[in-house]
Amino acid sequence: MSIYNAGCFYFEDGVQVWRAHSLSLSLSFLQIALYTNVLNRKHTELVSMMERLEGGLEKLKSTAAQVDDLKEKLAAQEVR
């Protein structure tokens, strides 16, 4: 085996290592992109749920105030 052939083997091994490294980098990038996508989607869902809960709480508060009003009116009518 000549020095030239040995150099070619090292070069080919280096290219294979580089390809494997670049493939793993692109896969890890895809994994990060996927994680970011899932994280953003879950964040959006949670914000939507929080807004829904806040709206529900406001509705309950206003309903409780209306019930208190009706109780007072009923009490006033029962006295008569």
Image (spheres, rainbow, N blue to C red):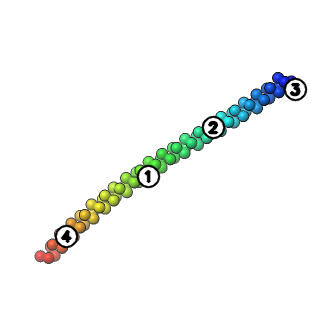
What kind of residue is marked 4?
Glu
In the image, taking residue 14 as reference, residue 43 lies left or right, namely: left
Q: Earlier in the sequence, mark 1 or mark 4?
A: 1
The residue positioned 61% from the left and 41% from the top of the image is 28
Return the residue at label 2. 25
Determine the image quadrant of residue 35.
top right
Distance of label 2 from label 4 (alpha carbons): 70 Å
Q: Is residue 65 left or right of residue 15?
A: left
In the rendered image, which residue does mark 3 sit on?
Answer: 1
Alpha carbon of mark 2 to alpha carbon of mark 3: how far?
Answer: 34 Å
Q: Which residue is mark 1?
A: 46
Q: Compute the Cα span from label 1 to label 4.
A: 39 Å
Q: Are marks 3 and 4 in contact (CB under 8 Å)?
A: no
**Mark 4 highlights which residue?**
72
> Which quarter of the rendered picture does the N terminus lie within?
top right
Q: Mark 4 or mark 2, which is nearer the start of the sequence?
A: 2
Callout 1 secondary element: helix
Q: Secondary structure at mark 3?
A: loop
Question: In what element is the residue under mark 2?
Answer: helix
Look at the numbered discs 1 and 4 and tell me whether their residues touch, using CB distance below 8 Å: no
Q: Residue placed farthest to the bottom in the image?
A: 79
Mark 1 vs mark 3, CA separation in Å: 65 Å
Outermost residue to the right:
1
- What residue is at 33 percent from the left and 59 percent from the top? 57
Q: Earlier in the sequence, mark 2 or mark 3?
A: 3
> Element under label 4?
helix
- Please state which amino acid type lies under the numbered disc 2: Leu
